[in-house]
Image (tube, helix red, strand yellow):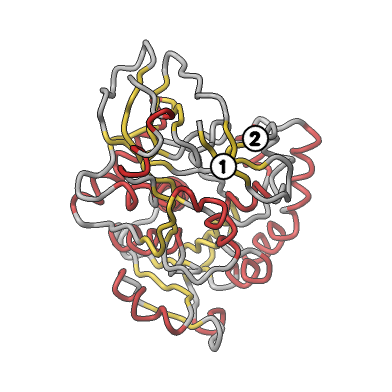
Amino acid sequence: MRAFVVRQYKAPVQEAEVPEPVVGPHDVLVEVRAAGLNVLDEKIRAGEFRQVLPYELPLVLGNDVAGTVIGLGDHVRGFALGDEVYARPGKDRIGTFAERIAVAETDLALKPASIGFEEAASLPLVALTAWQAFVERGELRPGQRVLVHAGAGGVGTVAIQLAKHLGATVATTVSARDADFVRELGADVVIDYRSQDFEQLLDGYDLVLDSLGGENLAKSLRVLRPGGKVIGIAGPPDAGFARELGANRLLRLAMTVLSSRVRRQARRLGVTYEFLFMRASGDQLRQITALVDSGALRPVVGRVFDFDRTVQAVQSLGQGGIRGKAVVSRTESSIRQHPENRRTP
């Protein structure tokens, strides 16, 4: 089976032949039609998560998938052969830059009927991130105010739309060229991060979704009302994340130390900070499917790469400049070109 792997951390991604996926009793075998690209893929390749996500190398990269069901584990009841599905596989079972992948039934959902595979593949990781930040962690309610950083990016484009659907007033930071674009997505307050300082313009916000970290995170704490919350997806990780991982005592201590400064800053301001590393959830994806099919949420795909150009696609992750998400796509013609690699149900 063709796939794109990293053989050692910091090394370039390479095309390789890898074994067929092992399909367990609760797994669904998916023929990949499209796979989303995420900054997380580049961070994994660079080894930035090796302490908390100790993957065995060589590793097939890829954290988003949309495709067709071509095989079922013995205990699978919720899907049928031929179903069009999408998922963010569990963090221990990534590998969507491949021709096929086995996904746990609980992580999978039928893709929205109103969109194609490429748009569907752009959604799982970023949409689940926004859902878990706003619905689970932030408990965002109508009338509240939320700041979404990097509003034209993968997470930002979905987060703006979800926050508006939940009834919030949304501020976002973007470059000037993206101002009208994010207004179309629903942003109420648009700040040009190159020429304006959001800390000087915003105050009394209920929630911030921070995807940048560093000084941006520190400033985000200061735009909150007392009792407000910053949810960070760029770090630093905290003790809560360590507990979610089931990390050992030493790693829990390390994460507590890493986040100690920002947590102290938050306490002094009467606000809170939480680190979010999204988790796979088929149940939440089904709710996201309903939002897409109702028109409340639309995916934003800024660039599509052919599957054969996955190496170049991963290299593009550090370049920026793409609105929404980039995806790699396996068209019907490319699948037909490799019939020897197509698995029969």
Determine crowd level at label 1: few under 14, some 14-19, many 20+ residues with C-alpha closer than 10 A.
many
Q: Quadrant of residue 50?
A: top right
In the depicted view, which residue is nearer to us: 141 or 197? 197
Q: Answer with mark 1 or mark 2, whichever residue precedes in sequence.
A: 1
Which quadrant is home to the C terminus?
top left
Q: Secondary structure at mark 1?
A: strand
In the depicted view, which residue is nearer to us: 28 or 92? 28
In the depicted view, which residue is nearer to us: 84 or 76? 84
Q: Residue at x 66, y 30 (%)?
A: 246
Q: Residue at x 68, y 66 (%)?
A: 214
Task: Please tell me whether residue 108 is drawn above or below residue 24 in the rendered image.
Answer: below
Determine crowd level at label 2: few under 14, some 14-19, many 20+ residues with C-alpha closer than 10 A.
few
Q: Position of residue 209 (x, y in %)?
A: 50, 61
In the depicted view, which residue is nearer to us: 66 or 221? 66
Q: Which residue is mark 2?
A: 243
The three-letter amino acid code for the residue at tag 1 is Phe
**CA gap, disc 1 to disc 2?**
31 Å
In the image, farthest residue toward the right: 250
Task: Please tell me whether residue 177 is drawn above or below residue 296 in the rendered image.
Answer: below
Q: Quadrant of residue 300?
A: bottom left
Q: Which mark is residue 188?
A: none
Q: Secondary structure at mark 2?
A: helix
Q: Position of residue 180 (x, y in %)?
A: 34, 80
Q: Which residue is mark 1?
A: 4
Task: Please tell me whether residue 297 is drawn above or below residue 5 in the rendered image.
Answer: below
- Residue 67 horizontal side relative to residue 273, left or right: left
